Amino acid sequence: MASRTHAGAVPSTLPRHQILDEQGAIADDPLLSPYVADVTVEQLQHLYRSMTAARRVDEEGTSLQRQGQLVLWVPLRGQEAAQVGSVWPTLPTDRIFPSYREHAVAFERGLAPSDLMRLFRGITAGGWDPEEHNLNLYTMVLASQVPHAVGYAMGTALDRKAAQDAGTPPETDPEAVIAYFGDGASTEGEIHESMVFAASYDAPVLFFIQNNQWAISVPFATQSRVPLATRAAGYGFEGLRVDGNDILGVVAATRYALEKIRAGEGPVLIEAETYRMGAHTTADDPTKYRERDEEEQWGHLDPVDRLRAHLRDAHGVEDEFFETVARENDEIAQRMRADVLAMTPPRFEDSFAKAYAEQHSLVDAERAEYLDYQVGFAPQDEMDTHDTRGAGA
Amino acid sequence: MASRTHAGAVPSTLPRHQILDEQGAIADDPLLSPYVADVTVEQLQHLYRSMTAARRVDEEGTSLQRQGQLVLWVPLRGQEAAQVGSVWPTLPTDRIFPSYREHAVAFERGLAPSDLMRLFRGITAGGWDPEEHNLNLYTMVLASQVPHAVGYAMGTALDRKAAQDAGTPPETDPEAVIAYFGDGASTEGEIHESMVFAASYDAPVLFFIQNNQWAISVPFATQSRVPLATRAAGYGFEGLRVDGNDILGVVAATRYALEKIRAGEGPVLIEAETYRMGAHTTADDPTKYRERDEEEQWGHLDPVDRLRAHLRDAHGVEDEFFETVARENDEIAQRMRADVLAMTPPRFEDSFAKAYAEQHSLVDAERAEYLDYQVGFAPQDEMDTHDTRGAGA
Amino acid sequence: MTQLTVAKAINAGLARAMEENPKVMLMGEDIGSLGGVYRVTEGLKSRFGAHRVLDTPLGEAGIVGTAVGLAERGYRPVCEIQFDGFTFPAFNQITTQLAKIHARSDGQLTVPVTIRIPYGGVIGSVEHHSESPEALFAHTAGLRLLAPSNAQDAYWMSQQAIACDDPVIIFEPKRRYWLKGEVDEKTSPGDPFKASVIREGEEATIVAWGPLVPVALAAAEAAREDGRNVEVIDLRSLSPIDFDTVTASVRKTGRLVIAHEAPTFGGLGGEIAARVTERAFYSLEAPVLRVGAYHLPYPPAAVEENYVPDLDRVLEALDRSFAY
Amino acid sequence: MTQLTVAKAINAGLARAMEENPKVMLMGEDIGSLGGVYRVTEGLKSRFGAHRVLDTPLGEAGIVGTAVGLAERGYRPVCEIQFDGFTFPAFNQITTQLAKIHARSDGQLTVPVTIRIPYGGVIGSVEHHSESPEALFAHTAGLRLLAPSNAQDAYWMSQQAIACDDPVIIFEPKRRYWLKGEVDEKTSPGDPFKASVIREGEEATIVAWGPLVPVALAAAEAAREDGRNVEVIDLRSLSPIDFDTVTASVRKTGRLVIAHEAPTFGGLGGEIAARVTERAFYSLEAPVLRVGAYHLPYPPAAVEENYVPDLDRVLEALDRSFAY
Ligand SMILES: Cc1ncc(C[n+]2csc(CCOP(=O)(O)OP(=O)(O)O)c2C)c(N)n1
Ligand SMILES: Cc1ncc(C[n+]2csc(CCOP(=O)(O)OP(=O)(O)O)c2C)c(N)n1
Ligand SMILES: [Mg+2]
Ligand SMILES: [Mg+2]
């Protein structure tokens, strides 16, 4: 029923921005090129490092999961430019609200790869202190983090107003907030309410959509007839459509958006067109729903290959650099693996302290019951003989 | 905080359609005028009748509520052109999903005014058989009826496909569906999901928004920076912005939209810009939140006055016609009043038969308990002495 | 001491919280210029400014969802849901986000959001304006639920909810908004999560909350005329529930009737009955009896008084209890 | 008679319903080409076509909301919610619309929508993938709730839910999807809203449903080794609940333990305990005991087995019951 051709479709007139073309050559983009004119080769090398480190850690995540060391892993391969390019231009004071695949975003914010793995090892639903890197936790219920980002952004604006009212000199770089979500999540009603609220309150928030063409097995065409960036105009703010595998295009679009946002012009939406090269998660099998052909086609648009070509061709960066980076990345992955293997599960009784911030009579009572009950089971082994897990699953 | 000027706003470029101008003269609209070229003076008179009858019944509703004969009334004054103009072009086979203020829509579909009043008399949450006039029930949870409309429309398309597959000759006028909602409801997430689904499945549905400028006390500017018709482009379908107090403009826009929809081109959105001249409901006091000035300004744009002027000036319709209509409307209102006063409350015990379509053990048990319990209370009067209602409220 | 209606007491409580803490802010539909459809927030926008009293766009998920973000930023948002029946568009944000963020973050994030829900029936209104959905929130860990029944609690619980670092939902008994009562603005009445024995008795206990507390008191009065001495407990907090107070009472009286406006089936009465029976099994002279609404959607106004428990149904349950 | 897993039995049940009635259609995220993340709908899209097996856009409110409209048009949509924890975006449509339309229309509209929710924990997954929200739906009149625990029920209940003119939510025990069992495709097993005594006993009764039924049976087995003869009831229907069967059993055994995966507080166990205590007060040798999860958000996979009731906790409750 959800046909890909729609007789009544009104096509989008939004341009698609690109700065680094498929071969890694610079393509001029009148609006956005100025925003990356100052990017140095060292910075490009940094971006390359970040993208490839994320890719390497991602591979290690899949392998750890296969070995039973993680309960699940969510591959990001293919989306490195979209992620690194959008977070690199942020300031430490900006708050980031990821979805659940933004590993490269997290690492670029300074999170240690192993911190991220706690969640996927099944020992916490969080894993890091959101304040430390101004990086919120992953959120599994699609779209739910987006109104939080808008509210947080409203709060920064309120703080700014309070400071102004108090006569404090204005910050030079007002805070911005980024909300990440995917093409599938864009359909959730909470995304819409988020956009309405953001527009209404001029919230300093960037809606950053990674359109990786798939929501598990469902192709983008099921979610929308037109690029998602087109939606922004319906709320009266700007939407940009950018080649998401083009690191410079993403950096430029993000800088352009953040500039507007910091200037108090309210929300902006960026849709980065990219591709999920791997499985949705380690529990997924893409051969069930998509063609090898399509994967190969997108393989030619790989964001890492493209940046490598650009570094080589335009800046004469030599093999040695790439080899060194590969070695460093292996080390990062090995360290992460070692850290993961060393992680110990939490004690269940600690859960009782986490549900509420303040004392709670029922939780206290149940904690006491649990501890009492546990006393009946020492040693641990005895418990396991009664365990029914796996009987059915 | 929700300021009405937004530094970063991207204005809408959508034109505003109008055919009957503020003085009741014909203004040419290149796109839409052809759609009302064939409207006869008799038809205009019919439209006038419908609009004024609805207005008259509306007044009676307020008065009945004041006299304690209704639990609530929801005035429609000001929105007669938007309502009558959008439903008049429909076919009996089209299914209508109203919100809760669409009284003129309901009457034009053939519903007796008193049928509508059952709900407001507090004796049912429905009041009529949705199949009889292909008119769904009022829905109090804002926006909730809109996905139903989309699903129903998907169903008509599925039926059409099944008929085709079975070799049945195609209908000449494929069914269309209209979903009514307001400017306030447009913010609800379910509206967004409805639009995504409709676009994805090419559902033959018209989203008809009456933007009456207010959601209770909240002005339209809080919901959106731009006209709501602008949203349609973000889903890849057409959105039209029309003067909602211009009966011909609304008829033309609706005909245009229904033509596309019947042709299988999927959803269309119409935003009719109108004004709620009265209170939100009989429980509301608009003086708390809006200026007399604004009400007066919109008073000059009154849809009934405008059509009356047009009928007089362009078609030489004389006073006698208007006087006759006024008399007839009084009769309609009187009949409605009499019918309302004659309505008897339901028996509570009948509620037990309505919760489920099929036999239900708990409902059966509770019904029996209730009847048993009631046996202890004859006569009725004795019960009332223990009644605490009104103690607080 | 001041005489205030429940609505005015909430208003005063909110105002005081806003005065004392600049991070407290109000959000909701029509709460600003209009002062809310029940006028509970009347005057607060002009007093504290449009940046602290937000007339939001019309989306409940947006209201609660942005409140979560504001709370993470250090604010203490108080969201009004206009009517009980319109809480459900925000159900995902409340259940999967607001309730779980503290646990998800291993305690690193707190989200002190207060949600005010005018709730309950017998107000002669239309569909979705008379619901009692408290059980749908009590089951979810991470939330706290308060149900003031009088002006004093309304005044203080509003402030205590805001001051609490956990999310708190306040079920405001809308049919009692105009009930007047004494408010002691000086002395905080202590723990809001404790039940209160508001009438002592020896022969049976009635537990009620919110709008049914006056009904429970009236039933105890009526029972006294029949020579029965009935204790009444205003439960006050629906999550956590103060089982100690209820159990102690039942150990004394041996009989318990629980009355709530929500349908009996799956309502909080079951939880209370089960737990009290477990804790006071040998003290019970009769099974715990519940008086709630029927397993039907809230009916039209014309017949709502047959649906919601009233004095007679509570008395009838007492009689049944005494018959054991 | 065929041996099928629970997942395959549902698949076969859906297929048969689709064969027998062209108005039956499936809707959900990833249910088409992928066959659902649990492969429950595998092969149905290629067999019945994309117009009858809809890979929908990613919005749960949209899925249930359009299903309501399709039902009003005469279809019988079966919606899959991908995981228990993602039901909540559709909560408004389920609670205020789907459940109430029949009553709202004074019986003129029927909305035979089936919602399939793979539910429950102990699958070693991440947050929101292991919830047991049945109590959040049971409280709402207008809905029916089924919880198959085995392949035979999975096969038949799918079809019975679809055939029912009321909305039905099926809680599918996802950790038992690969549990094999006999399916009799010939004879319909009768009323799906009746509980089933799956093991007879005289000294105590255990009531369980869905994923905990095998645990309850194992507990009865273990108790037998201690010389205790325990009856086990598979509740099967969570709304309505077959109190007659449970009460009759308790009248016989005098002791009842209820086990469910959902948190105890506010869970369905309270409803059952309260009602059975009311109906079998003089038969009870001990208070009805409940074994559920704690009042905490579902914890990380590493410790989930301490959270969800297991054999030991059921046995411990039996012991406590016998100790009275
Ligand atoms: C509310 C909700 N519904 C369903 C799911 C199950 N689910 C997890 S990921 C996913 C697809 C998401 O697609 P998209 O938003 O494009 O992000 P991507 O996975 O492609 O990064 C689905 C359906 C969920 N997590 N939350
Ligand atoms: C989900 C939901 N939230 C809140 C309300 C309370 N409410 C009833 S009408 C209304 C304003 C609606 O405004 P709009 O959609 O513009 O329609 P109008 O009343 O102007 O016709 C509100 C907030 C509701 N009925 N449903
Ligand atoms: Mg995607
Ligand atoms: Mg309006």
Image (cartoon, coloured by chain):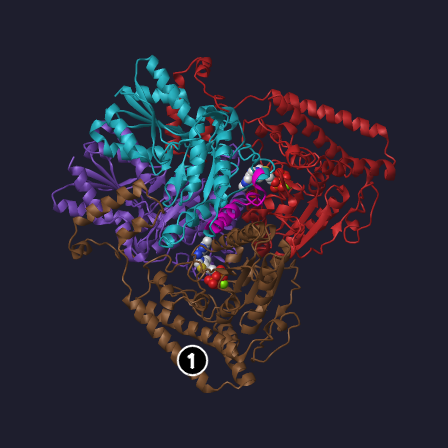
Chain colours: A red, B brown, C purple, D cyan
Q: Quadrant of residue D33?
A: top right
Q: In the picture provided, is B382 more to the left or to the right than B303?
A: left
- Count all numbered tags in the image, as a single digit: 1
Q: In the picture provided, is C131 more to the left or to the right than C56?
A: left
Quarter of the image containing the C terminus of chain B? bottom left
Q: Locate residue A153, reporting x and y percent.
A: 59, 48
Q: Locate residue B89, reporting x and y percent.
A: 53, 68
Q: Looking at the image, is C175 positioned above or below residue A143? A: below
- Asked whether residue B157 is in view, the answer is yes
Q: In the picture provided, is A282 more to the left or to the right than D221?
A: right
- For label 1, the residue is B325
Q: Is residue A376 magenta?
A: no
Region rendered in magenta: D47-71
Q: Locate residue C138, reporting x and y percent.
A: 39, 39
Q: Locate residue A370, reporting x and y percent.
A: 40, 24
Q: Looking at the image, is B197 positioned above or below residue D154? A: below
- At mark 1, the secondary structure is helix
Q: Looking at the image, is C185 positioned above or below residue D154? A: below
> Camera-side residue: C157 or D30?
D30
Q: Residue at x 80, y 42 (%)?
A: A22
**Label 1 Cα neighbours within 10 Å, binned few <14 / some 14-19 / many ≥20:** some
* Residue type of the residue flagged with mark 1: Val
Quarter of the image containing the N terminus of chain B? bottom right
Q: Is residue D62 magenta?
A: yes
Q: Quadrant of ligand 1?
A: top right
